[in-house]
Amino acid sequence: MTGEAGAWYGLPGVGLADGRLEVFGVFGDGTIRCTWQNRAGDDNNNWSDWLSLGVLDSPN
């Protein structure tokens, strides 16, 4: 799967209390981003834009 910053890695998802899904990914530029369903059970591409949660720090 690709996003606005190119390829991203991982597809961990969680179910929110109201039934919507939220997905997290690490993009090729090192940012951690998430997107979520706007309505529970809506499979018609009704998802939020990707939200950046910051850059993944590299261990020393």
Image: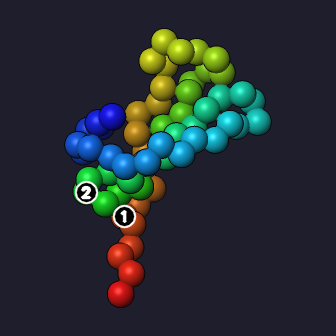
Secondary structure at numbered mark 2: loop
* Residue annotated with mark 2: 29
Whole-percent x and y of residue 29?
25, 56
In the image, is residue 12 above or below residue 48? below
Is 24 located above or below residue 15 in the figure?
below
How far from the left and from the top, in percent, is residue 17?
76, 36
Residue 49 visible in rendering: yes
- Image point 32% across, 51% down: which residue? 27
**Quick one: quadrant of the N terminus?**
top left
Which residue is located at x 54 percent, y 34 percent? 36
Task: Give residue 20's mark.
Answer: none
Category of crowding for the residue at label 2, using alpha-carbon neighbours closer than 10 angstroms: few (below 14), some (14–19), many (at least 20): few
Rendered residue at 65%/29% (across/down): 20
Name the residue that disc number 1 marks: 55
Quadrant where the image shows the C terminus:
bottom left
Identify the image quadrant of residue 37: top right
Q: Earlier in the sequence, mark 2 or mark 1?
A: 2
Residue type at tag 2: Asp
Q: What residue type is labelled 1?
A: Val
Along the viewing direction, whichever of 33 and 25 lies nearer the viewer: 25
Give residue 39's position: percent from left, percent from top.
Answer: 61, 20
Q: Which residue lies furthest to the top in this view?
A: 44
Mark 2 and 1 residues: CB-CB less than 8 Å, in contact? Answer: yes
Specify whether residue 52 is in view.
no
